[in-house]
């Protein structure tokens, strides 16, 4: 799905936190991201519409790219947006797999094998697609890197 990633021209201008805002929240997310030992591997940001979740997601994604050379990397980002017709939930995992294949050379052959040996994988349930295209290949890769995957606007799909 084109236009779902962090730097897509379709999303221009990208949502941003205004200077001096979201400092505490983004600092907590950055600390979680940089921490090697934390209680959970998933971070869920929720709130009412219009509160700035997309701006925080964009800021965190940019931080992950900036810090990618030493602590982690933005593996993939998928920004759902109803008005731009980016709400097809059935395309989310193949899009994320594509982005991960670009970021991590070792990931590409792993997911290629999955898709080759199971040609009907994209017709399976989302749970199966997630497990076989995202979880299983990433578990086989080195755990020295944090693979940050940002899903934004889940309420749009």
Image (spheres, rainbow, N blue to C red):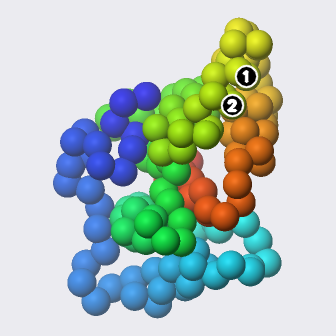
Is there any visible trace of residue 99 in the rendered image?
Answer: no
Q: Nearer the viewer, mark 2 or mark 1?
A: 2
Residue under the image location 29 percent in, 61 percent down: 15
Q: Nearer the viewer, residue 142 or 30?
A: 142
Question: Which numbered marker is on residue 102?
Answer: none
Q: Which residue is mark 1?
A: 114
Q: Position of residue 1 (x, y in %)?
A: 43, 28
Q: How many marks?
A: 2
Density class for disc 1 (Cα within 10 Å; few <14, some 14-19, many ≥20) is some
Q: Tag 2: Cα neighbours inside 10 Å, few (<14), some, or many (≥20)?
A: some
For the residues labelled 2 and 1, say whether their Cβ atoms are less than 8 Å apart.
yes
Instruction: Please name the residue that numbered disc 2 is placed on.
Output: 110
CA gap between label 2 and label 1 equals: 7 Å
145 vs 70, left or right, is right
**In the depicted view, which residue is nearer to us: 150 or 148?**
148
> Residue 62: x, y in percent?
36, 65
Horizontal side, residue 46 vs residue 41: left or right: left
Q: Position of residue 84 (x, y in %)?
A: 32, 35
């Amino acid at each position: 799905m084109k236009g779902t990633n962090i730097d897509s021209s379709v999303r221009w201008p990208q949502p941003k936190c205004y200077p001096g805002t979201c400092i505490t929240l983004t600092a907590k997310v950055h600390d979680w991201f940089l921490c090697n030992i934390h209680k959970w591997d998933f971070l869920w940001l929720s709130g009412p519409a219009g509160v700035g979740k997309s701006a925080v997601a964009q800021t965190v994604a940019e931080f992950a790219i900036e810090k990618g050379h030493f602590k982690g990397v933005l593996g993939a980002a998928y920004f759902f947006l109803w008005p731009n017709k980016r709400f097809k939930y059935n395309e989310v995992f193949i899009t994320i797999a594509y982005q991960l294949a670009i970021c991590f050379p070792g990931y590409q052959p792993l997911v290629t094998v999955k898709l080759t040996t199971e040609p009907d994988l994209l017709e399976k349930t989302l749970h199966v697609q997630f497990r076989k295209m995202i979880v299983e290949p990433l578990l086989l890769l080195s755990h020295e890197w944090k693979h940050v995957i940002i899903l934004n606007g889940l309420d749009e799909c």
